Amino acid sequence: MSVSSRLSPGQSDIPTNAAARANEVITCKAAVCWGLGEAMKVEEIQVEPPKSSEVRVKMLYASICHTDIFYCSELSLPMFPKVPGHEGVGVVESVGENVTGLKEGDVVIPTYLGECGECENCRSPKTNVCLKHPVTFTGLMPDGTSRMSIRGQRLHHIFSCSTWTEYMVVNANYLVKIDPRIAPSDASFLSCGFSTGYGAAWKDAKVEKGSSVAVLGLGAVGLGVLQGARNQGAARIIGIDKNERRREVGEAFGMTDFINPNESNKSISELVNELTGGQGVDYSFECTGIPSLVNEALQATKVGKGMSMVLGIANVPTVDISLMALLSGKTLKGCFFGGIKVQSDIPVIVDKCINKASSLDIQLDELLTHEVQLEDMNKAFELLKQPDCVKVLIKI
């Protein structure tokens, strides 16, 4: 499937009277979720002008991440009603006071982490979790208010933003300006899922050349891990998924071996250990959010030096972990957004998506399998249930 090959904003992307509208409330369409497990309703909402340090963005495309589904169907935080979506790409419509580095017409993607460049964590190569602009779970702006409403009722968003809408307001510290030459689908997918996996192999685990890797779950995050591990020079990359359709997709991203757990009565860790001569892998990545697989991923790594990284989100506060696995020298680690420092690293990934000159560049064509209009949001959720669906792009 193909969409417009670049994001250079045209006359149709930014209203010609944008300057006049910068201080006005905009009425636009958005997908609204009114309660846990309820279907999306595309309705008219009101989006206020940006305040100090804020930016109003005209959304062009968005996509669906598993986390959006999780926060609408399994977890009631942030509160309802809410406009979900945290993956997307858009154009700056207007900026508030004290915004530097962004102007009307810039192409941007939202992130759920910031990068101030000054705090202890931003100065450290060990983490990307900015202390000044951290992940937020209130569904509101940093000042505790919302710029969106529907019939006078306050609307919440997911993390720092809401992308399933024609317009949104975001704190400028959670936006990254990108090269408009990138394909719109690529830009949207980079704002969370794929980058989380790619960064986990590249920035956080720092997968070593010649090493072995196992990836549990071959959705967008898992496929990102495959690509990151290949680019890091891993010699053996094992993909694990119950969906047989992911075998071919995984190979496109660098997978060398495929395990379908449904084809055996053995556990995933046993299957990985068998495939590696009883040793296990140097690195494993749990990308499904299934609690029991966290321990399976750990058990699939090498004694003494294996590392297992948790990327999937689950609706449980704790998981059972083998103490002996930890005592044997294995490492269990979690990370946000793949360890990527958003302002420093996302432009690097964007360049790799634009160039596509070698196997070490990033080609995301296999991620995009379906496209829908904003008005057909509920159709998008049905498409995700199909075995051949990887990512759905939403045209705003």
Image (tube, grey):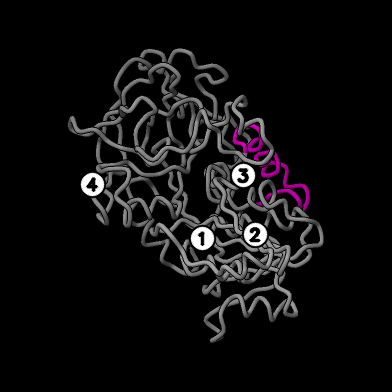
Query: Which residue is identified by label 4?
Result: 34
Give amino acid for label 3: Gly
Query: Which residue is identified by label 3?
Result: 339
Q: Is residue 360 magenta?
A: yes
Give the vertical position of 175 relative to 312 (above or below).
above
Residue 72, percent across and down? Answer: 32, 52
Please give the name of the residue rendered at 47% of the width and 43% of the height, measured from the top-left corner: 87
Position of residue 372 in the picture relative to residue 263 (left or right): left
Q: CA distance from mark 2 to mark 3?
A: 16 Å
Give amino acid for label 1: Val
Which residue is more in the foreground, 165 or 295? 295
Query: Which residue is identified by label 1?
Result: 390
Element type at mark 1 = loop
Element type at mark 2 = strand
Asked if residue 163 shows in the view, the reply is: no
Magenta part of the protein: which range? 341-363
Residue 229, percent across and down? Answer: 71, 57
Label 3 vs 4, first from the N-terminus:
4
Q: CA distance from mark 1 to mark 4?
A: 26 Å
Number of labels in the image equals 4
Please give the name of the residue rendered at 38% of the width and 18% of the height, measured from the top-left corner: 51
Main SS class of the magenta portion in the image: helix
Comparing labels 3 and 1, the label whose residue is closer to the camera: 3
Please give the name of the residue rendered at 40% of the width and 57% of the height, measured from the top-left corner: 317
Q: CA distance from mark 3 to mark 1?
A: 23 Å
Crowd class of label 4 (few under 14; some 14 to 19; many from 20; radius 10 Å): some
Comparing labels 2 and 4, the label whose residue is closer to the camera: 2
Query: Which residue is identified by label 2?
Result: 331
Label 2 vs 4, first from the N-terminus:
4
Q: CA distance from mark 3 to mark 4?
A: 33 Å
Residue 185, percent across and down? Answer: 54, 46
